[in-house]
Image: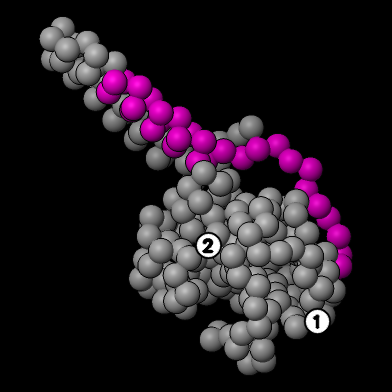
Amino acid sequence: MKIHKEGHRSIAIAIIIFAIINLVTLFFISAYSPLISWLIFVVTFCLLLFIFSFFRIPRRAHTIGEDSLVAPCDGTVVVIEEVQPDEYFKDKRIQLSIFMSPLNVHVNRNPVTGEVVYSQYHPGKYLVAWHPKSSTDNERHSVVYRAGGKEVLVKQIAGALAKRIVNYLKPGDKVEQGSEMGFIKFGSRVDLLLPLDTKIDVQINQKVKGGVTVLGKW
């Protein structure tokens, strides 16, 4: 397991804060109240482990298939419905949304092999990720892939805790299925807008793994 590059600064800051808090506790509290001192150590150590865990990149064998659409992130499927898109597409699409809790791996991956034809950042609000309007009102970054004559839009959406969306793609990029597209820090959601003839292979409340779980085929 590796640590994602987006976490290096956050982890360094967390280690410094952990050290300062526990040094202060050691010199000013431990002699008078060792129980409180140990409690502070345990709590801060658990928080430090959480920060390390959040930026983890586990070893995985990624799914590769020209006719397969793989999950761009870890999480839980919370929406599968037909919608009228508010961006890029004019025709109706299937929206498939994946909620990412703070405990999930937060690396975002390309769901298909193809060409990036659209990449756009949108500032916005920070509604909770499961809010119905988070898809259109929250801070987000949208990418459209063209693969085998089909187009897929993937939308990284900030949540109440997610304050930074990172996206590495620009129009014209050629990408491989399963390679990194970006990262969202601390709790979020990813929406996919798919052609109506996509055969969906997952269900509501199903757990999925980024780069591994096949969401659908065409």
- Residue 38: give x, y in percent of width and height: 29, 16
Image position of 190 (left or right of 8): right
The residue furthest bottom is 90
Front position in the image: 8 or 78: 78
Q: State which quadrant residue 174 falls in.
A: bottom right
Q: Residue at x 86, y 67 (%)?
A: 67
Q: Is residue 49 magenta?
A: yes
Q: Quadrant where the C terminus lies?
A: bottom right
- Residue 136: give x, y in percent of width and height: 47, 78
Label 1 with label 2: CB-CB less than 8 Å: no
Secondary structure under tag 1 reads: loop
Q: Residue at x 13, y 15 (%)?
A: 28
Image position of 92 (left or right of 54): right
Q: State which quadrant residue 17 falls in.
A: top left
- What residue sits right under mark 1 in the picture? 197
Q: Residue at x 37, y 66 (%)?
A: 126
The magenta span reads 39-67
- What residue sits right under mark 2 in the picture? 189
| Crowding near the residue tagged with mark 2, few <14, some 14–19, many ≥20 C-alpha atoms within 10 Å | many
Which three-letter amino acid code belongs to the residue tagged 1?
Asp
